[in-house]
Image (spheres, coloured by chain):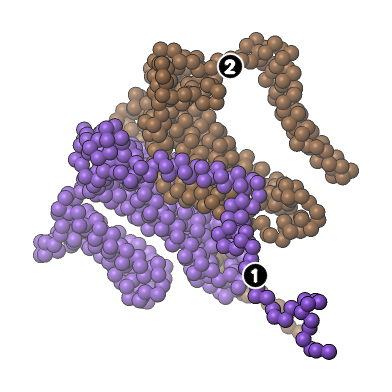
Amino acid sequence: MTIAVDPPKRGFRLSQLIYDTRYRSITIQVVALFLIAALLTFLIVNLVQNLHALGKDIDFGFLSSRAGYDINQMLIPYDNSMSHGRAALVGIANTMLIAVLGCIAATIIGVLAGVLRLSKNWIVARLMTVYVEGFRNVPLLLWILLIYALFTESTPSPRDFGGDNPTASMWLFDTIAVTNRGVYIPMPVWGPGSTGLVVIFLASIVGIFAFRSFARKRQAATGQILPVFWVSLGLFVIPSLIAYYALGKPLSFSYPELGGFNFQSGLQVRNSFTALWVALSLYTGAFIAENVRAGIMAVNKGQSEAAFALGLRPNRTMSLVILPQALRVIIPPLISQYLNLTKNSSLAIAVGYMDVRATLGGITINQTGRELEGILLLAAFYLTVSLTISTVMNIYNRSIMLKER
Amino acid sequence: MTDTPDRESSYVRTAMLPPQTAPSTQVGAIRWVRENLFSSWLNAILTILSIYFVWTIVSSIYPWLANSVWDATSLTDCRAKMDERLGEGVRSACFAVISDRWQQLVFGFYPQNGYWRPPTALIVFLIAIAPVLFTQLPRKMLWFTMIAPILIFTLLWGGSIWAPISVALGFVVGFIAYRVIGSRFSALLAVLAAIILPILYWLTLSGTVNSALSAIAPIGLPYVESKDFGGFTLSIVIGLTSIMLSLPLGILLALGRQSNLFIINKVSVVFIEVIRGVPLIVWLFTAQLLLNYFLPKGTNFDLMLRVIIMVTLFSSAYIAEVIRGGLAALPKGQYEAADALGLDYWKSMRLIVLPQALKISIPGIVSSFIGLFKDTTLVAFIGMYDPIGLTGSIRASTDWNGVYWELYIFVGLIFFIFCFSMSRYSMYLERKLHRGNR
C-alpha cells in the first residue's frame, strides 16, 4: 500500500509572484492599482496646480449667485433675478420634458414601423425600410437641422393666416396653427375645482390597473375571461366625464387666435422644441423599429402555429404568445435607445432649445468662467439619469425574464 | 356494333383538352397586386395611404429637383436663372451652391495646391486596410499596412517624412528588444524591456535621429495645420483614426470587465459606465475646455488630437459593451476547453475566445462604428469645420445666404453612402463568417 505523500513544502519564493497563477493575479492587480493611482495623482496634482495658478479654486458657490439671463421655455417659475442653480433646474426640467416626450413618441413610431416593416404589404414594407435606413444612416444633427429648417422656412408666417384672403389655414377645426414662429395649440385653463378632476382622472387610471390585475387573477382561478378592454375604456372616460360636469366644467381651453401680426392666447410651442422632439423621435424610432423587428423575428414560427392549433384568435396569439416572448428580446436594446435619446437631447444646442446643456453647461459657464464645476455637474446629472433609467429598466427586465427552474 | 361511338346520341371526349390558363386574377401582376397590396381591407387602406403619401412627396419634390440650377455664382444669380427658365417666381433647387463650394465641403480650408493629398491618403489607407478586411488578398500586403500610418500622417499633415519615421523607429526598437532579450533571458524581462527601451528612445534619441535624417535628406511635404482641416476630410480623418484605435481599446475594456481580477474589473466597469452615461457633446466640451487643466502647465496640444482621443475613448466604451455581449454569448465550454488544453490567458483569448466572440459581435461593432462616424459631426460645436459646420459658414457668406435644403441634402447623401456601405459590409461579413448549424 502506498500512502499519498504531499509534495515537499517549500517556502514562498519571490518568483512565485510571477510564475504561480495563485499569486500572479495579486501581482497584476497591485501593479495595476499602482499605475492607476499614479495616473490619477498626476492628473489631480496638475489640476490643483493649474487652478491655483489661475486663482480659480474649485467652488460651487456660483450656483447661488444671480443668473441674469432669460430662458425662453420654463416649466418651473424662473426669471433672470434668480440664481444659476435655479436656471440649471429649469434646464433640467426642459431636458426631462424632451426626453420623456421623445421616448413616448419614439416608442410609438418605432413599434409601428417595426411591425409594418414585417408586413406582407409590399409597398408599406418598402416605405418603412426607406424610413429606417434613411434615418439610421444620416447623422442626427443633420436631421435636427433639416427639420428645424422645415419648421422655420417652409411654414407660413402668422400674418398669412389673417387678412382678407388668408394663404394659410389652421389645422384640426381651427385649433392648431403651425407658423414659422412656433406651433400654437389650445392652452388648458384650470378653473376652480380642477384639482378634483385631476384626482378623479388619476384614480380612474389606478382603477384600470387594479381591474386588469383582478381580471388576470380571476382568469387564472376560474378560467372566465372578463371584457378587459371595454371596461378599461369605460373607466378611462366615464368617471372623468361625470366629474367634469359635476364640478361645473372646471377645465376649459383657450384657443389660439390671430391678433394683429401674431397669435394671441393659446400655448406657443417653440419651433426649437418641436423640431428637436420630432427629429429625436423619428431618429430613435428608426432604431427601435429595428429592435422590434428583430424581437418579433426571434420568436419561433412554431409558437404562433401552436397558438393557432390551440384555437387562439390572432390578436390573442399576439398578446399572449408572441409579444411576451418578443418583449424579452426587445426590452434590453430598448432601454439603451431610451438612454441614447436622453443623451442625444443635448443636441438641443443646434436649435437653441434651452436644455440643461444650454443653461448650466452653456450660459452659466460662459458667465461665471467655472468650466470645471459646470461640466462636472452636467456630467453628474447625465450620469444619474442614465444609471437611474438603466437600473429601473433592468429591474423590469428581470421581472419579465424567462424564469428558469 | 361499331367501335366508334355514336356521335348523335352521346358525347365522349377522345382528346385531352389543352390546359387552360389560370384565371386572370391568379397570375402575373394582378395576382401579385392582390397578394401583396390588397390582401385584406386593412392592407388595402394601408396601400392606398402609402401610395397617396409617396405621390404627395414625389409630386412636390420632383419638379423642384428636376428643374434644379447647377451653374450660378450666388443665390441671386441662381434665382435670376430660375426666373428666366421657369418663369417669374417659380423656385427650384439651386445645386449651384454645391458646384460652387464642393471643394470647401470636401477639404475645408486645406491649401488648394494640396487637394491631391487627402484623397491619396485615403487610397493608401484603403490599400493598407484591404488585406485586413478581405482574407483572399496576399498576406505580404500586411507589410504595407505596417508602414501605411507613416505615409498617411505625412500626406495629411505634411512636414518632414523623417519625423513620423523616427517616432515609428521606437516601435522597432521595442520589437527588437523583445525578440533579443526574450530569446536570451526571461519573457518578463523582455516585456519590460519592450516597454522601457522605446520610451527611453523617444525621450532621448528620437529628436536627434529626426534632425540628423532631415539634415541628410530633406524629404517632406508642406506643413498643414490641423485647423485647416475641414469638411469630409475632417470627418473621415477623425472617424477612421478613432475607429482604428477604439477597437483594440474596446476589446481590452471588454476583457477587463469580464476579468475576475477585482481591481481591473471595477476600473473597467467604472470607466465604461461613466463614459457611456454622459453625452459625447459634454465630452467634447471637456476636451476643449478642461483637458489642459489636467496636464502639466504649458502643455497645449492640438484640438484635433484631443477630439480624436475623446471620440476614441467614447466609442471604445460602446464597443466594449458590444464585445462583452459576444463574450457572454459564448458557451462556457469554450473557455473550459481552452483551459483544458493548457493555454494561458492571452493564448486562449487570442486563439479560441475572441475569434468567436468578435464574430458574434460584428453587427454591433459595425453599428458602433457607424454611430461614431455620424457623431464626428458634433465637432461643429467646438469650433471645428466638419461638413455640417461648413453648411453654416457657407450660408453665412453673402453669396449663399438662404440656401438650406441643397446643402443638407448633399451632406446627408454623402453620409448615407458611407454609413450604408459600412452596414452592407457588416452583413457580408456576417454571412461569410456564419458557421452555424447547417
**Alpha-carbon distance for marks 2 and 1?**
68 Å
**Quarter that holds the N terminus of chain A:** bottom right
Identify the mark at residue B20; answer none if there is no mark.
1
- Indicate the position of residue B32 as horizontal and vertical percent values: 58, 58
Residue A387: assigned label: none
Please name the amino acid that badge 2 sits on: Phe
> How would you rate the neighbour count of disc 1 (Cα within 10 Å): few for under 14, some for 14-19, many for 20 or more?
few
**Residue type (three-letter) at the residue carrying disc 1:** Gln
> Which residue is pictured at 35% across the width and 42% down the height?
B63
Rendering colour (chain A) = brown
Give residue B291's position: percent from left, percent from top: 34, 41
Q: Considering the numbered disc 2 on the image, is that residue within a helix, a strand or a loop?
A: strand
Whether residue B54 appears in this view of the structure is yes
User: In screen coordinates, is B232 left or right of B209?
Assistant: right
Residue wearing tag 2? A253
Left or right: B150, with A100 as reference point: left
Asked if residue B128 is positioned above or below residue A321 in the image, the reply reads below
The answer to whether one can see residue B190 in this image is: no
Work out whether A356 lies above or below B70: above
Q: What chain does badge 1 belong to?
A: B
